[in-house]
Image: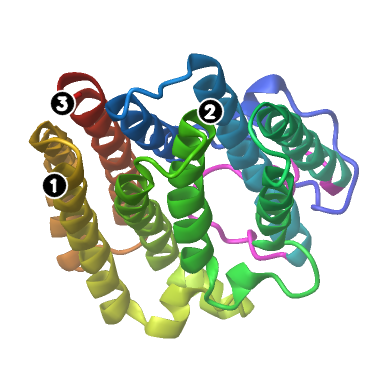
Amino acid sequence: MTTPHAEPARAPLRHWIAGARPRTLPAAVAPVLAGTAVALHVDAFVVGKALLALGLALALQVGVNYANDYSDGIRGTDADRVGPLRLVGSGLASPRSVKLAAFAALGVGAVFGLVLAALTAWWLVAIGAVCLLAAWGYTGGSSPYGYRGLGEVMVFVFFGLVAVVGTTYVQVEGTTGLGAATIAGVGIGALACAILVANNLRDIPSDREVGKRTLAVVLGDRRTRLLYAGLVAASVAALVGVAALTSWWALLAALSLLPLVPALRTVLGGAQGRELIPVIQQTGVAELVHALGLLVGAGMIGR
């Protein structure tokens, strides 16, 4: 096998697509849908800005995925990985090429962000810069926060609160609806965190072995499973809050419980390793259903 530090042959497109981890993209789409739901509810929907926010979120998600692939690969923490394909760790692509792909995706995101700032308010550039630094710092740099148990916190902040509230704000251009958007961000952020918690629960043995101190490693197996359940409960509680501030039609988002109930059974039932992969997928589907429920219920029917 080619080592991660060698220069392998150019990876085919299908491997680059797999390396971008398309199954994680609902976590980028969901907050934009939720933020747009609130904008629709207050009659402030702007299709162009919603699409720019979506492009920004997707580009950042792909950039984060490639950045994680690069950083984990050069550290050797992907050597015994159970989850999806990693380009550097598997030797399918050179670290340099994956790093460039990460920078390219983050650069595309920066362009979308600059356009949104130009159309809304230039102070948003500062928030965008922080988002880019957070995207790289998850596993990159000399002291990645993902290795210090802070990954879930940052996912909650950036893929929950910032993404949802930001999507609403750029369309509303004021404070109208930001209370509902904040609560919606809590729900979306909780489910985004739950995806990461399930992922890190699966990887506790391999992460512990290589010294990667994720929150799951710090908490241990049992408390990580309880954390997953708590995040699911938080998403339901936030949904009720959004419904109270917008429309009770927002409770359509409770359809997210359909994939979450079996996921909870699996997690609380003690599943290990590959048995947890369906949980990650089910939680991602639940987050997307949650956001779609808000879009249809609060944004379209409940206007």
Question: Which residue is label 2 attached to?
Answer: 54
Under circle 2, the secondary element is helix
| Residue 74 location (% of width, % of height) | 78, 60
Kindly identify the amino acid type of the residue bearing the numbered disc 3.
Gly
The overriding secondary structure of the stretch rendered in magenta is loop
Please give the range of residues in magenta: 76-95
Seen at 71% across and 50% down, the residue is 132
Q: Are marks 2 and 1 in contact (CB under 8 Å)?
A: no
Residue 23 seen from this side = no
Tell me the distance, in whole angstroms, between the alpha carbons under discs 3 and 2. 23 Å
Under circle 1, the secondary element is helix
Magenta region includes residue 49: no
In this rendering, the answer to whether 289 lies above or below 205 is above
Q: Which of the pair 173/63 is nearer the observer?
A: 173
| Residue 38 location (% of width, % of height) | 33, 34
Question: Which residue is label 1 attached to?
Answer: 244
| Residue 173 location (% of width, % of height) | 52, 35
- Residue 301, numbered circle: none
Q: Which of the pair 58/146 is nearer the observer?
A: 58
Which of disc 1 and disc 3 is earlier in sequence? Answer: 1
Question: Which residue is label 3 attached to?
Answer: 302
Under circle 3, the secondary element is loop
